[in-house]
Amino acid sequence: MPSNKSQGEHAELRFMLQAMQRSLHVLKPWGDNSPYDLVLLDPRSTRFPPRIKRVQVKSTSSLHTCGAYRVHAVFGGKKQAYARRHIDVVAAYVVPFDAWYVVPVRYVLRAPYIYMRPHLEHTKSSWERFRNAWHLLE
């Protein structure tokens, strides 16, 4: 098993590849003092300045006892909840299923856990609507 840091770095690289395959430009901040991991620009945008998306990448490889893969969408040593001033999107990656969930920050403001069930064919989880929701990054 890779360390949490190693798994997180791997997830960031996989996310960058996915974003670039969708013709998005990826910017990586220097260091790790920002509440976001990456910034995305859509070069097809006609807006000036172009709209940016600040993305926090989270990953998990363990099935939680609740029957879902879970990530905790918080940051910092005190585990603060993200706010709209910090990020725009959480990109959560379920490693064993190569599954991405692209979740706008407004959905994690009050409930900072994202529960993902890519292993179930039929689920009524409200988080499933964000599975492969790459269009939210455009």
Image (spheres, grey):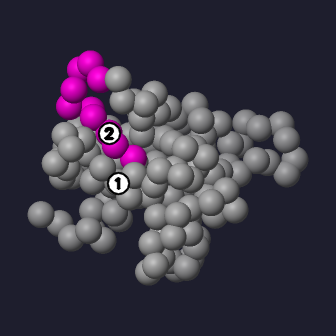
- The residue at the far left in this view is 1
- Image quadrant holding the N terminus, namely bottom left
Rendering coords of residue 28 (x, y %): 56, 65
Rendering coords of residue 40 (x, y %): 62, 51
Q: Residue at x 46, y 55 (%)?
A: 112
- Which residue is nearer to you in this view: 46 or 108? 108
Which numbered dot is residue 108? none
Which numbered dot is residue 71? 1
Q: Are marks 2 and 1 in contact (CB under 8 Å)?
A: yes
From which residue to which does the magenta span run?
114-123
Q: Report the amino acid beneath label 1.
A: Val
Crowdedness of circle 1 by 10 Å Cα count: few (<14), some, many (20+)? many
Residue 121 painted magenta: yes
Residue 117 lies left or right of residue 72; in this view the side is left
Which numbered dot is residue 116? 2
Cα gap from disc 2 to disc 1, whole angstroms: 8 Å
Q: Residue at x 87, y 47 (%)?
A: 48
- Which residue is nearer to you in this view: 56 or 64? 64
Q: Secondary structure at mark 2?
A: strand
Q: Report the amino acid beneath label 2.
A: Met
Rendering coords of residue 102 (x, y %): 48, 41
Q: Residue at x 38, y 40 (%)?
A: 100
Q: Secondary structure at mark 1?
A: strand
Classify residue 35 by image quadrant. bottom right
How many dots with numbers?
2
Report if residue 39 is visible in the image.
no
Helix, strand or loop: magenta stretch: loop
Rendering coords of residue 9 (x, y %): 35, 65
Classify residue 42 by image quadrant. top right
- The residue at the far front in this view is 110
